[in-house]
């Protein structure tokens, strides 16, 4: 597998604040890579350095084989970025916005019209082209933001908290488009998000805490390492569950925490009379995040 | 070139489509119109008439109209060229506030192309508005009393272009380090409220205290106003001389309306005024380029 992003020993400080400390990771081609951390963990600093918006203090950044120090322009052509907030011009029409941004990549005239047609088909915004951007709904605007990021056919799509504040329908549309792009064009997606269920779908996850990597791996491995399993047991009385260990009462069931799947199996085998109706689930990414950082990720703030 | 043309087109469109930005830039010229409409024109009219009558001669209403009109037109154009440029150029700050600047700098476009695009689009927008304002002003002079030659009109247009270049270069340097809406408002308010006074548009500099006159004589914009005034009123003064007005009276009026400016007692000739204005434009452009180069180096 090709490595699309390779970051080695990256460091950046703002005065006495060490925003990123000796950060190293790799993102492979076609991967959905999730970058998690509370606000101030160093996610945006890392993205800004990758995009050439911020100078690094130390380390090396290579994207699609190009070194940031030597070929920043090549890297900029490889990256498409969807920012957390829409950064397009709200007084201009959708078409004018996309036309002005496409020209920055040398795309104009017929080439622009063809690409605009493709993107309007993909993201279903033909009827929005003449409308002023500021008058669109949040979801409609998000589609245009994605179209802007895809104008120059980037190899890597950077999504900086792309679904924050979106309705479920638009979130679904966005993820469907991203899945299609990954499938059809083998596009690499670099995601930061506050929604842990989105991170659970990632191929690889890096959790940042205070500018350093606190944990990394595939979601299953992280869950196995940092959280236990849970057995949800139905149709029993609380008195019967008390002897089984730590549990949480639910509406019509009890959730019993066990260290791992083997322990769950052992418990079931020991008490077959109780386990008539049950399910075993892995811990969630929220649990992983909490276990790794000691913080809950709620809207980007530590809780 | 595609990038630069697209950015200039985008910036210019945004300025004209953003009603807030567009109308804010016209506030100072509107204030001036209100001042003239309510009392300044009659104050100047009385002042000219009494100066002429004190010399024992009479003057036609048309000549007085041409004189007051020339004063208004030159003042209006002097502030318009600067305040429109400042407001139009605030787009470079707005882009930082909205994040549009970040969206543009993640593309391979060169920072210098971006900086040049702001300069060019401000120049274009300001020239368009000041061009229209000049045509309206000339029509107004035609209505009040026309004493201009083709050469006066050509020189008036040259003065407008030079002042627009000056306003664009000055606003580029002042707006460049700004990054918040608060700073934008502060600069907009200071320029709108203050520039009319310090360039002698609201009130002739000759009426200020001597110390203030000396300070103002260091500001290049003052000479731009004087150039406009010289060319807008030259025909009126020529007509006065032809009608037999004493030279001392004409010169006294020229002094009172800032057609004659003095730098520590030395009269500044028109050639020196042009030289001062052109040099200022060149210096400010070099300063803008230097600021940009230093910023780019800092960004790494």
Image (cartoon, coloured by chain):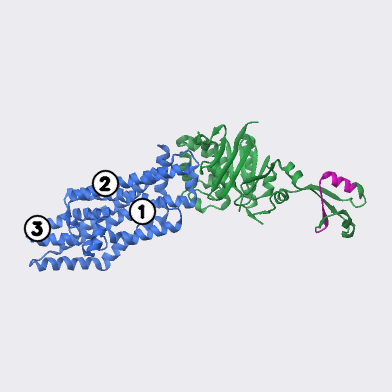
Chain colours: A green, B blue
Mark 2 falls within which chain? Answer: B
Asked whether the residues under the numbered discs 1 and 3 touch, taking CB atoms below 8 Å apart as contact, a structural biologist would say: no
Q: Residue at x 26, y 65 (%)?
A: B36
Q: Is residue A259 magenta?
A: yes
Q: Residue at x 46, y 43 (%)?
A: A100
Disc nearest the viewer among 1 and 3: 1
For marks 2 and 3, the one nearer the N-term is: 3
Which subunit holds the residue at mark 3?
B
Q: Position of residue A86 (x, y in %)?
A: 53, 49
- Mark 2 = which residue? B279
Q: Which residues are magenta?
A: A251-268
Instruction: Say few, some or many: other residues with alpha carbon within 10 Å of mark 1 (under 14 / 14 to 19 / 20 or more).
Output: many
Secondary structure of residue under mark 3: helix
Quarter of the figure with residue B286: top left
* Residue A100 visible somewhere in the drawing: yes
Residue B60 % position (x, y): 12, 64
Q: Mark 1 highlights which residue?
A: B86
Name the residue beneath numbered marker 3: B241
Could you say which is closer to the camera, residue A30 or residue B41? A30
**Mark 2 or 3, which is nearer the eye?**
2
Discs 2 and 1 carry the same chain letter:
yes
Using the numbered discs, state the Cα–Cα distance from disc 2 to disc 3 in whole angstroms: 34 Å
Question: Mark 1, chain letter?
Answer: B
Within 10 angstroms of label 2, few (less than 14), some, or many (20 or more) residues? some
Q: Helix or strand or loop: what does disc 2 sit on? A: helix
Image quarter (top left, top right, bottom left or bottom right) of the N terminus of chain A: top right
How much space separates mark 2 and mark 1, taking CA atoms? 20 Å
């Amino acid at each position: 597998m090709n490595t699309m992003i390779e970051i080695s020993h990256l460091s950046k400080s703002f005065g006495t604040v060490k925003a990123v400390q000796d950060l190293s990771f790799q993102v492979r081609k076609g991967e959905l890579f999730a970058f998690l951390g509370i606000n101030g963990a160093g996610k945006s600093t890392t993205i800004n350095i990758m995009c050439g918006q911020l100078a690094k203090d130390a380390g090396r950044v290579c994207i699609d084989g190009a070194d940031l120090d030597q070929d920043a322009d090549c890297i900029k052509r490889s990256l498409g970025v969807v920012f957390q907030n829409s950064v397009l011009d709200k007084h201009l029409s959708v078409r004018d916005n996309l036309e002005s941004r496409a020209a920055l990549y040398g795309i104009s005239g017929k080439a622009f019209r063809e690409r605009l047609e493709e993107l309007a088909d993909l993201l279903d915004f033909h009827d929005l082209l003449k409308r002023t951007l500021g008058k669109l709904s949040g979801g409609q605007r998000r589609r245009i933001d994605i179209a802007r990021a895809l104008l120059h056919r980037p190899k890597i799509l950077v999504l900086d908290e792309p679904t924050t504040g979106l309705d479920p329908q638009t979130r679904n549309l966005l993820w469907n488009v991203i899945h299609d792009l990954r499938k059809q064009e083998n596009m690499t997606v670099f995601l930061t998000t506050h929604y842990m269920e989105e991170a659970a779908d990632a191929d690889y996850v890096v959790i940042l805490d205070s500018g350093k990597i606190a944990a990394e791996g595939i979601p299953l491995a992280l869950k196995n390492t940092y959280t236990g399993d849970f057995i949800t047991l139905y149709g029993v009385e609380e008195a019967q569950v008390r002897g089984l260990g730590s549990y949480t009462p639910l509406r019509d069931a009890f959730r019993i925490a066990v260290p791992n799947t083997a322990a769950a199996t052992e418990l079931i085998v020991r008490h077959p009379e109780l386990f008539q109706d049950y399910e075993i689930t892995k811990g969630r990414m929220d649990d992983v995040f909490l276990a790794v950082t000691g913080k809950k990720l709620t809207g980007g703030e530590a809780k | 070139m595609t990038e630069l043309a697209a950015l200039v087109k985008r910036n210019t469109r945004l300025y004209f489509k953003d009603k807030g930005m567009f109308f804010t830039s016209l506030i100072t010229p509107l204030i001036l119109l209100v001042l003239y409409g309510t009392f300044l024109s009659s104050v100047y009219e009385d002042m000219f008439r009494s100066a002429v009558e004190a010399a024992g001669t009479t003057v036609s209403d048309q000549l007085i109209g041409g004189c007051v009109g020339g004063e208004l037109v030159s003042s209006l154009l002097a502030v318009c060229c600067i305040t429109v440029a400042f407001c139009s150029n605030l787009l470079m700050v707005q882009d930082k506030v909205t994040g549009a600047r970040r969206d543009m700098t993640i593309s391979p476009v060169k920072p210098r192309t971006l900086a040049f695009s702001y300069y060019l689009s401000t120049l274009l927008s300001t020239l368009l508005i000041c061009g229209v304002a000049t045509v309206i002003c000339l029509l107004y002079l035609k209505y009040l009393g026309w004493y201009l030659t083709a050469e006066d009109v050509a020189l008036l247009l040259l003065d407008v272009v030079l002042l627009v270049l000056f306003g664009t270069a000055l606003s580029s340097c002042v707006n460049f380090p700004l990054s918040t809406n608060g700073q934008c408002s502060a600069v907009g308010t200071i320029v709108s409220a203050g520039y009319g006074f310090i360039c002698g548009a609201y009130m002739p500099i000759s009426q200020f205290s001597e110390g203030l006159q000396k300070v103002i004589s260091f500001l290049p914009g003052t000479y731009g106003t004087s150039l406009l005034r010289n060319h807008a009123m030259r025909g009126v003064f020529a007509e006065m001389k032809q009608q037999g007005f004493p030279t001392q009276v004409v010169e006294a009026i020229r002094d009172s309306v800032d057609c004659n400016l003095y730098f520590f007692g030395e009269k500044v000739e028109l050639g020196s005024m042009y030289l001062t204005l052109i040099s200022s434009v060149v210096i400010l452009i070099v300063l803008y380029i230097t600021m940009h180069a230093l910023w780019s180096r800092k960004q790494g």
